[in-house]
Structure formats: C-alpha cells, structure tokens
C-alpha cells in the first residue's frame, strides 16, 4: 500500500503566510488609524478616547462602566468598540 503523498513542504518556510499575515495587520492598523482620525466611534457615534494602559489602544467613550467614562457619555448605552493603531 502506498503512503499518501506528503503535503509537507508545499509552503517552504511559510514566507508567503507570514507576508500575508503582515499585510493583514498593516491593513487593520491603517483602518484603525482612519477611524481614530475621525475621533468618532463607528458603532455608536460617541467620541473615542485613548486608553493609556496599552500602546495604540482606543476605546469608545461609552466603553466600560459608566463611572469610568467621561461625564457626557455616562448615560450612553454600553458600547464595545475598541481598536488598536499600533
Ligand atoms: Zn461606541
């Protein structure tokens, strides 16, 4: 009985996969920067704010517990939008 043809090494070094992944990340970052440049959450329209806990982390002004939000967004419905520009 013949062994099935190996499917290994059809993608030497995974260089293409790495290139594709890097391009995908670059595209995501470019998209995030475009959103942040508007200063407005694309989901609910509240202002965006930077979370300094992580580099490039931006969140909707209505993200998280109301007590942690800026006063103008404490009454806004909870919004989960967040993005990374780095
Ligand atoms: Zn929002």
Image (spheres, rainbow, N blue to C red):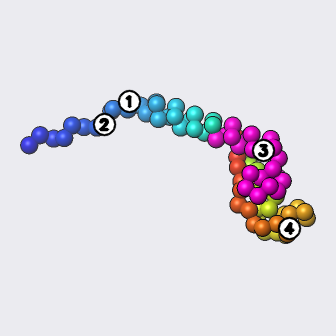
**On-image quarter of the C terminus:** top right
Q: Residues within 10 Å of mark 1 (few under 14, many from 20)?
A: few
Which circle, 1 or 4, is nearer the viewer? 4
Q: Residues within 10 Å of mark 3 (few under 14, many from 20)?
A: many
Specify whether tag 2 is near ligand 1 (CB below 8 Å).
no
For the residue labelled by badge 4, is the local secondary structure a helix, a strand or a loop?
A: loop
Query: Of the residues under marks 4 and 3, which one precedes in the sequence?
Result: 3
**Extreme residue in the right direction:** 71
Which circle, 1 or 3, is nearer the viewer? 3
What's the magenta region? 28-49
Which residue is at the front of the view, 83 or 72?
Answer: 72
Disc 3, disc 2: CB below 8 Å? no
Would residue 70 be seen by someone viewing this image from the given angle? yes
The residue singled out by tag 3 in the image is: 36
Identified at 8% across, 43% down, the residue is 1
Q: Quadrant of residue 26?
A: top right
Q: Which mark is residue 74?
A: 4
Q: Is residue 5 left or right of residue 71?
A: left
Q: CA distance from mark 3 to mark 2?
A: 42 Å
Residue 78 point in image, percent of width and height: 75, 66
Q: Residues within 10 Å of mark 4 (few under 14, many from 20)?
A: some
Q: Is residue 3 left or right of residue 22?
A: left
Specify whether tag 4 is near ligand 1 (CB below 8 Å).
no
Specify whether tag 1 is near ligand 1 (CB below 8 Å).
no
Disc 4, disc 2: CB below 8 Å? no
């Amino acid at each position: 009985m013949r062994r099935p043809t190996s499917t290994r090494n059809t993608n030497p070094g995974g260089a293409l996969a790495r290139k594709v992944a890097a391009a995908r990340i670059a595209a995501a970052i470019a998209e995030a920067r475009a959103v942040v440049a508007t200063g407005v959450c694309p989901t609910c329209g509240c202002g965006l704010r930077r979370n300094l806990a992580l580099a490039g982390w931006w969140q909707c002004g209505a993200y998280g517990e109301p007590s942690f939000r800026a006063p103008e967004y404490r009454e806004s419905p909870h919004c989960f939008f967040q993005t990374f520009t780095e």
